[in-house]
Image: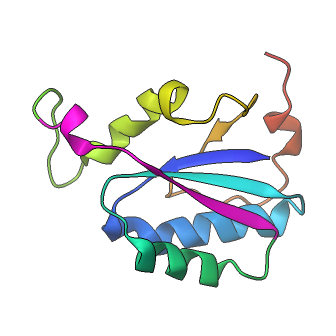
């Protein structure tokens, strides 16, 4: 299962909660693509460490915030990272045939496998 999400440093712990709930309720291998522009190796180590009991690969996808900085509105509530999902077609490897974007403020309380595999 391929999952994408976007975040900045303020949302690391929320992302860990979301991904943990995903893993607990979906016991399959998960590749989690983390769209970001400010996370460092230490941040990714924290995420991976928190998820070490699950079959999940955390894959950093670094995006330059300058692509959007002066072009789209943002404020303290709406960060520039919310726009990163618009770049998924450009930044996710072409080998990924299917991916589901999940916001970091979700709790997954059951399997999403049927939804993930819907024939579009």
Q: Measured from the top left, where is residue 34 in percent x and y?
A: 52, 54
Left or right of residue 104, residue 29 in this image: right
Q: Quadrant of residue 56?
A: bottom right
- Please give the name of the residue rendered at 72% of the width and 34% of the height, measured from the top-left corner: 96
Relative to 20, say whether 111 is above or below: above
Q: Is residue 112 visible?
A: yes
Relative to 36, say whether 66 is above or below: above
> Which of the pair 39/110 is nearer the observer?
39
Q: Measured from the top left, where is residue 83 in percent x and y?
A: 34, 35
Relative to 118, say whether 39 is above or below: below
Q: Quadrant of residue 18?
A: bottom right
For the C terminus, the image quarter is: top right
> Which of the pair 98/105 is nearer the observer?
98
- Please give the name of the residue rendered at 17% of the width and 41% of the height, measured from the top-left corner: 74
How many callouts does the rendering have? 0
Magenta region: 55-69
> Which of the pair 115/56 is nearer the observer?
56
- Please give the name of the residue rendered at 53% of the width and 49% of the height, measured from the top-left corner: 5
Left or right of residue 18, residue 79 in this image: left
Q: Quadrant of residue 109?
A: bottom right
Residue 60 colored magenta? yes
């Amino acid at each position: 299962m391929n999952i994408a999400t976007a975040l900045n440093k303020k949302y690391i712990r929320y992302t860990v909660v979301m991904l943990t709930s995903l893993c607990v309720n979906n016991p399959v291998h998960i590749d989690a693509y983390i769209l970001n522009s400010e996370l460092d190796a230490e941040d990714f180590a924290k995420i991976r460490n928190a998820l070490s009991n699950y079959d999940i690969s955390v894959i950093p996808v670094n995006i330059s915030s300058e692509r959007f900085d002066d072009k789209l509105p943002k404020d303290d509530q709406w960060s520039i990272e919310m726009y990163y999902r618009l770049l998924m077609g450009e930044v996710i490897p072409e080998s990924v045939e299917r991916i589901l974007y999940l916001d970091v403020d979700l709790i997954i309380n059951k399997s999403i496998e049927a939804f993930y595999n819907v024939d579009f």
